Image (spheres, rainbow, N blue to C red):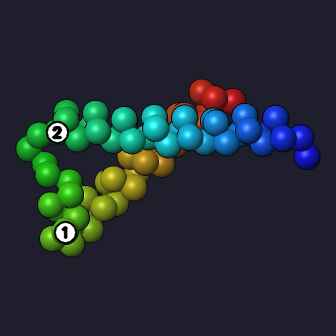
Amino acid sequence: MQLSILAVNFGYAIFGVILMFLSYRLIDRLTPQVDFPEELKKGNIAVAIFIAAIFLSIAIIIGHSLN
C-alpha cells in the first residue's frame, strides 16, 4: 500500500467530516425554531432520526461529489 494513497484518503475523510459539520451548522441556523441539542437531551427520538437522516444524506452527497 502506498503512503500517498493513504494520505489522500485521510485528507478526503477529514474534508468530508468538516463539510458534514458545516452542513449541520447551516441546517441548524436555517431552523431557529428547533433547538436540536436540547431536543436530543429531552430524548426526542423523532429529532434523532431527523438528524441521522440529515447526516446520511449529506454523507451520500459528499461521497458522490468527492468520487
Q: Position of residue 56 (x, y in %)?
A: 48, 48
Instruction: Indicate the quadrant containing the C terminus: top left, top right, bottom left or bottom right.
Output: top right
Q: Position of residue 2 (x, y in %)?
A: 89, 41
Mark 1 and mark 2 in contact? Answer it, CB < 8 Å: no
The residue that disc 2 covers is 31
Front disc: 1 or 2 = 1
The residue that disc 1 covers is 41
The foreground one among 15 and 38 is 15
The foreground one among 13 and 49 is 13
Q: Is 24 positioned to the left or the right of 20 in the image?
A: left
Q: Quadrant of residue 64?
A: top right
Can see residue 58?
no
Distance in Å between CA atoms under marks 1 and 2: 18 Å
Q: Quadrant of residue 60?
A: top right
Q: Residue at x 67, y 42 (%)?
A: 10
- Considering the numbered disc 2 on the image, is that residue within a helix, a strand or a loop? loop
Q: Amino acid at mark 1?
A: Lys
Q: Residue at x 45, y 34 (%)?
A: 19
Can see residue 36?
yes
Q: Residue at x 63, y 29 (%)?
A: 66
Q: Position of residue 45 (x, y in %)?
A: 26, 68
Q: Residue furthest left?
A: 33
Q: Residue furthest bottom?
A: 43
Q: Residue 30 got which mark?
A: none
Q: Position of residue 16 (x, y in %)?
A: 54, 38
Q: Amino acid at mark 2?
A: Thr
Q: Residue at x 25, y 59 (%)?
A: 47
Compared with 18, 47 (above or below) is below
Q: Residue furthest top?
A: 65
